[in-house]
Image (cartoon, helix red, strand yellow):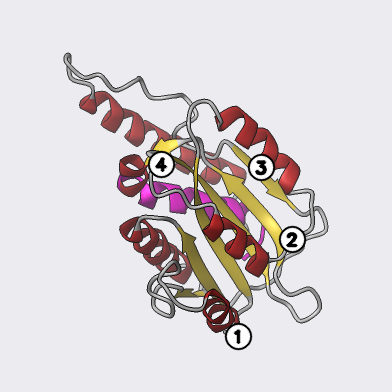
Amino acid sequence: MPSSRPVFRARRRAVAAGMLLVACAALAPAAVAPPVRADESGLADRWMDATAARIGLHKVLIVGIAKDPRARRRFEDRLVTVLRTHDTEGVTSYSIVPDLQAPGDPEANMKTLFALRVDGVITVRLKPVDAKSEEAWAAGWRAAQQEPQRARAYVETSLREINPEADDFAAEVTLWAMGSVEPGRRIWAGRFPRQSINYLRKHVNEMVQLVVDEMQYKDLF
């Protein structure tokens, strides 16, 4: 059964309150960090295929696309843990391909990942975004959801755009259906505001929970 709207909203309010307390505690008199933005605690935007229906996921591949291996593992591990509470098996991509950017054959890596028999794929992309490019990225993200794309092509493109020198990133989460008719079709996507890699590491648990709650509310599990 999908989560009721009151329960979903209550959980989001609780997470937002907890994150606000953490942010306030971190602001010492001599701190130079900017104040926390009001939208930090939740998704900045989301999209869903209007034709998507309950797809009954049982086994999902989790693919973290990030320059930071620790951030990748934490996102993937946390998603596996949360999916388990929905009777869905999650498979981490790092357990199959430890380093998506390691020297070798990229085509072979993609074949290995997408040869798995899974019902769906959840990609978590940490896209390099700075203060100047954030607004353009946000507009481009929404427009991109209207264009047809497949999971494998998305991962390949994202890997080429990783910037090892970036300091801030925007987390994009996408759910892809892996049915036999349209394998790798995007059915849901959400994005978070720009954050530092340290923030993302620290708040990965809350972010993943919010994403899965949203998917559950949309009856995708």
Specify the amino acid type for callout 2: Gln
Question: To which quarter of the image does residue 198 belong?
Answer: top left
The answer to whether residue 65 is above or below residue 107 is above
Question: SS class of the residue under badge 3?
Answer: helix
- Which callout, 4 or 1, points at the residue further toward the start of the chain? 1
In depth, the one of 184 and 130 nearer the eye is 130
| Residue at (43, 80) in percent of width and height | 96
* Quadrant placement of the C terminus: bottom right
| Residue at (34, 35) in percent of width and height | 19
Q: Residue 87, percent across and down?
A: 51, 74
C-alpha gap between disc 4 and disc 3: 19 Å
Question: To which quarter of the image does residue 133 belong?
Answer: top right
Viewed as shown, does residue 126 lie left or right of 136?
left
Q: On the image, numbered disc 1 is attached to which residue?
A: 117
Viewed as shown, does residue 29 lie left or right of 188?
left
In depth, the one of 185 and 159 nearer the eye is 159
Q: Residue 135, percent across and down?
A: 60, 28
- Which callout, 3 or 2, points at the residue further toward the start of the chain? 3
Q: On the image, numbered disc 2 is attached to which residue?
A: 149
Q: On the image, numbered disc 4 is attached to which residue?
A: 166
- Which callout, 4 or 3, points at the residue further toward the start of the chain? 3
* Quadrant placement of the N terminus: bottom right
Residue 166 visible:
yes
- Are the residues flagged by discs 4 and 3 in contact, CB closer than 8 Å? no
Span highlighted in magenta in the image = 202-221
Question: To which quarter of the image does residue 111 belong?
Answer: bottom right
Specify the amino acid type for callout 1: Arg
Q: On the image, numbered disc 3 is attached to which residue?
A: 141
